[in-house]
Image (cartoon, grey):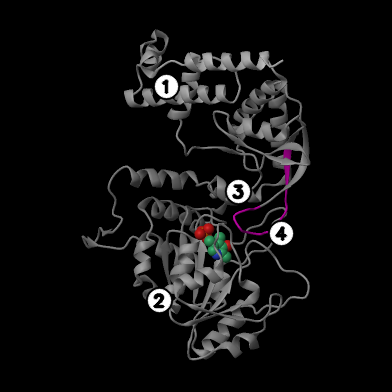
Amino acid sequence: MGAPSQRGESGKNALLRSLPSIEQLLRRPALESRLAAIPRARAVAALRLAVERVRGRLLRGEARPFEDADVDEALRSLLTPRLRAVLNATGVVLHTNLGRAPLAPEAVARVAAVARGYSNLEYDLEEGERGTRYAPVAGLLTELTGAEDALVVNNGAGAALLVLAALAAGKECVLSRGELVEIGGGFRVPEVMRQSGARLVEVGTTNRTRRSDYEGALTPETGLLVKVHRSNFEMVGFTEEVAVAELAALGRARGVPVFQDLGSGLLVPLKGDGLTAEPSVRHAVTAGVDVVAFSGDKLLGGPQAGIIVGRHALLSRIKAHPLTRALRVDKMTVAALEATLELYRDGRPEAVPTWRLLAQPSEVLRARAERLRGLLAAQGVTVRVAEVSGQVGGGAMPLARLPSFACILTVQEPEGFLESLRGAEVPVIGRIADGEVLLDVRCLAEDELGRVAEAVGGTAGQERGP
Ligand SMILES: *Cc1c(COP(=O)(O)O)cnc(C)c1O
């Protein structure tokens, strides 16, 4: 007894001792040709990584000597960008982990056009003098929302922080207890208020808040009446809230500005199977809300941005606040946002990918799922097509269940299967439901189905074993 494990130990030690040095590997003819075209520092890094990986495997008890193929694998991982494109088979259209809104080709082209050279980002070409970087989008935003003025910052959370800091620091902000929400990623409304320097005054109860609650909280110290859209959950049952128009009327009557954090910035009504109602920016502006903030990359379908629209006088105060400079957007954001907003202005919202992905009819999705099943069958993989329910994501329309179609695979180890799909050349992100692997086709383009089938075929081949 004990002999086999001793032999295992000594075998392992022998393999560990036999691990080649970097110098030895650099001189191996087979590797020399493979590494010739790669910068020396990267080649050395790849060799180190390969040896370390084999050492790690040996220490974990896997008795396999170093092979040249280990270098290829290390090279692949070092030469692949860390941030790269993936195929979204989750069915979640606005997936924050997957980069939220895919951009329209028009927006991508505009980004490329200004990114590769100089631009008039802050230069007024007519006057030949300094301009503002918001000018290209401010006009489009006021036209599309009916607001007097507009400003764009880095993201929605930044927009909310900025508005509170600029309009209510050192003053009281009145907010319903039913709207003290957490958006996700640690963005909690009470916390953001503290950071802005505003003092939170909670009114009403979790489920019911009335006009008289707001009214009773108004003092000479009140700086802002605030409404936060419950974008990622809904309240049902014995509930009551004050409509934005009513809150706006109260603010106007008492000389207190009203701010609404709208979350998702819907510019024109969006219709599609399973979609629920979402307030539009224009609705808030028309209702009399003085300042509205929303995201650029949620339902709007543009780049990550925080958009603030509202009354001139208030926007002027916001623009003058130092945080505006700290949260300013890059030229690529302005370019993508301008091109996206133009699609709305031209009456072509269906050209915005988010829009199109959400509005797809079930029949189109069923046909796509059938096509994927056919491609998978050609790879020797059997799946069944079934109707499933997807989500909008990105903290929008939380109750909407989008009827979609998916290819469903019954596999031994669903978690391992998904992991292997993530390791494909173009990673495929699927999900698990009831112990099965689900590939929802809503967010897959027709010309991506072949790639998905290849990745699934490769993974299924591994699972069946060589
Ligand atoms: C999503 C959201 C935010 C944050 O916007 P980001 O663009 O993700 O920073 C703020 N408020 C509400 C109500 C939201 O839904």
Provide the residue designation for mark 3: 356
What is the spatial separation of the Cα atoms under label 4 and label 3, in whole angstroms?
20 Å
Q: Amino acid at mark 1?
A: Leu
When the figure is inspected, residue 63 is found, relative to residue 175, above or below; the finding is: above
Q: Residues within 10 Å of mark 3 (few under 14, many from 20)?
A: some
**Left or right: 333 in relation to 213:** left
Name the quarter where the C terminus is drawn. top right
- Disc 4/disc 2 C-alpha distance (Å): 35 Å
Q: Earlier in the sequence, mark 1 or mark 2?
A: 1
Would you name the residue on which mark 2 appears?
A: 312
Write the start and end of the magenta stretch as one range. 392-406
> Which of the two labelled residues, at mark 4 and mark 1, occupies the earlier sequence position?
1
Mark 3 close to ligand 1, CB under 8 Å: no
Which residue is label 1 attached to? 47
Q: Residue sitting at 65 percent across and 80 percent down?
A: 242
Disc ID at residue 399: 4
Q: Is residue 451 visible?
A: yes
Q: Which mark is residue 407?
A: none
**In which quadrant of the rendered image does the N terminus lie?**
top right
Inspect this view and state whether residue 263 appears: no
- Give ligand 1's quarter of the image: bottom right
Amino acid under label 2? His
- Picture coordinates of residue 16, whole percent (x, y): 50, 18
Q: Is residue 359 above or below residue 197?
A: above
Label 1 vs label 2, nearer the camera: 1
